[in-house]
Amino acid sequence: METRVAVMGIIVEDTNAVNLLNEILHEYSEFIIGRMGIPYKQKKISVISIALDAPQNTIAALAGKLGNIKGISVKTAYSNVISHD
């Protein structure tokens, strides 16, 4: 299976979306290398970064699911590191 390393940036503007966000991330936990969340209290948002190693279609599917949640914005950056596991 061909996998890519990517980082996903997530902005949470609506705290009501957090439970669904965490459920979806749990579904993809086998592909997550690490996660960092930073609350930005002055702006009442949270900034989350997710490092992934997964097939490109899996990364795109995760970004799509998260992007469809009201109050969540997502952008993904792919590295040129490709593995053939």
Image: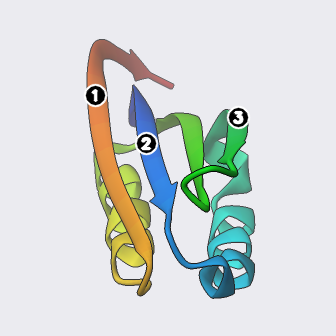
Outermost residue on the front side: it is 42
Residue 1 visible to an observer of this rendering:
no
Check if mark 3's residue and mark 2's residue have beta carbons within 8 Å: no
**Of marks 1 and 2, the one in the foreground:** 2
31 or 71, which lies in front?
71
41, above or below 3, in the image? below
Give whichever of discs 1 and 2 has the lower sequence position.
2
In the rendered view, does 11 fall on the left or right side of 63?
A: right
Give whichever of discs 3 and 2 has the lower sequence position.
2
Q: Residue at x 66, y 87 (%)?
A: 16
Q: Residue at x 41, y 87 (%)?
A: 70
Q: Which residue is mark 1?
A: 78
Question: Tag 2, which secondary structure?
Answer: strand
Q: Position of residue 26 (x, y in %)?
A: 75, 65
55, above or below 85, in the image? below
Q: Which residue is mark 2?
A: 9
Q: Position of residue 1 (x, y in %)?
A: 42, 37
In the rendered view, does 73 fall on the left or right side of 26?
A: left
**Label ID, residue 36:** 3
Question: Tag 1, which secondary structure?
Answer: strand
Give the amino acid at mark 2: Gly
Q: Residue at x 43, y 41 (%)?
A: 8
Q: Position of residue 24 (x, y in %)?
A: 63, 73
What separation in Å lies between label 3 and label 1 (alpha carbons)?
A: 18 Å
Residues packed near mark 1 inside 10 Å, few (<14), some (14 to 19) or many (20 plus): some
**Label ID, residue 48:** none
